[in-house]
């Protein structure tokens, strides 16, 4: 990879980091723009498959917390104080924490969920903590891969490829492995769009993807 490409991608990551922190006030608008207004519904598409006591990693501005507001045993964490202040519009069950070092007891949750997570979700420390805080038959749920239909979707896809210099997401099989456990992959329709919902039990071992 050329030095230009490396530095360019570092700059893009820097921008998205700022968006999640100092520029958090603009997050709702940008998320709405790149998803044609579907971002909140994409995040909340996870709600029907979440069960029991739920820990949300990277709760962001709180869209999923809003959908789960009537449920008991739901906690959202985020490392960004800016995002936590936005999420506080919907719930007070928030903790500032790093997913790689969760301040919760072992086997304290039935579900751990992350929606459109950054690269932290693949960190071995994060995966170890998810495994630790889940009950033996607990589940991990990840929402990702939002896709728009029609012309606007093609424009957004083109912009995405320009930003990442041609890099596009991999085609996903029916089952993938994150760390050493399998996740079932399902594409769910959300209006004139769709989103991927990945579910699995971290305590079920499998070959690494």
Image (spheres, helix red, strand yellow):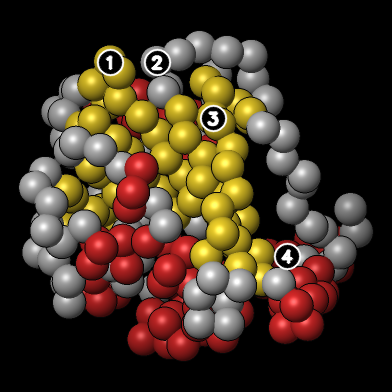
Label at residue 40: none
> Could you tell me residue 25's position as x and y percent?
36, 86
| Residue 108, horizontal then vertical, whole percent | 16, 29
What residue is rendered at 55% in x and 23% in y?
Answer: 182
Task: Say which residue label 4 marks.
Answer: 9
Mark 4 → mark 1, Cα distance in angstroms: 39 Å
Camera-side mark, 4 or 1: 1
| Vertical placement of residue 67 versus 172, above or below | below
Is residue 151 found left or right of 83 in the rendered image?
right
Instruction: Give SS at disc 3.
Output: strand
Q: Position of residue 193 (x, y in %)?
A: 61, 68
The numbered dot on residue 183 is 3
Which residue is denoted by mark 2 in the rendering? Answer: 203
| Image quadrant where residue 78 sits | bottom left
Say what secondary structure mark 2 lies in.
loop
Name the residue furthest right.
Answer: 2
Q: Residue at x 45, y 13 (%)?
A: 204
Earlier sequence position, callout 4 versus callout 3: 4
Q: Are marks 4 and 1 in contact (CB under 8 Å)?
A: no
Kindly report the distance in space between the C-alpha atoms of the residues bearing marks 4 and 3.
28 Å
Whichever of labels 1 and 3 marks the residue nearer the N terminus, that label is 1
- Which tag is nearer the camera, tag 4 or tag 2? 2
Query: Disc 4 versus disc 2: distance between alpha carbons?
Result: 35 Å
Can I make out residue 80 in this image? no
Q: Is residue 205 left or right of residue 176?
A: left
């Amino acid at each position: 990879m050329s030095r230009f490409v490396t530095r360019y991608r570092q700059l893009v990551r820097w921008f998205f980091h700022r968006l999640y922190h100092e520029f958090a006030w603009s997050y709702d608008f940008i998320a709405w723009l790149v998803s044609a207004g579907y971002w909140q519904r994409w995040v909340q598409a996870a709600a029907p498959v979440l069960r029991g006591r739920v820990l949300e990693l990277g709760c962001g501005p709180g869209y999923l917390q809003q959908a789960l507001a009537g449920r008991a045993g739901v906690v959202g964490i985020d490392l960004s104080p800016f995002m936590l202040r936005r999420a506080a519009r919907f719930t007070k069950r928030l903790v500032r924490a790093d997913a790689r070092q969760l301040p919760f007891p072992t086997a304290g949750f039935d579900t751990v969920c992350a929606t459109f997570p950054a690269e932290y979700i693949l960190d071995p420390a994060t995966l170890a903590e998810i495994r630790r805080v889940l009950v033996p038959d607990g589940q991990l749920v990840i929402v990702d891969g939002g896709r728009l239909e029609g012309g606007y979707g093609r424009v957004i896809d083109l912009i995405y490829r320009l930003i990442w210099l041609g890099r596009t997401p991999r085609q996903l099989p029916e089952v993938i492995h994150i760390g050493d456990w399998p996740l079932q992959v399902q594409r769910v329709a959300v209006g004139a769009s769709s989103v991927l919902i990945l579910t699995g039990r971290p305590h079920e071992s499998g070959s690494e993807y």
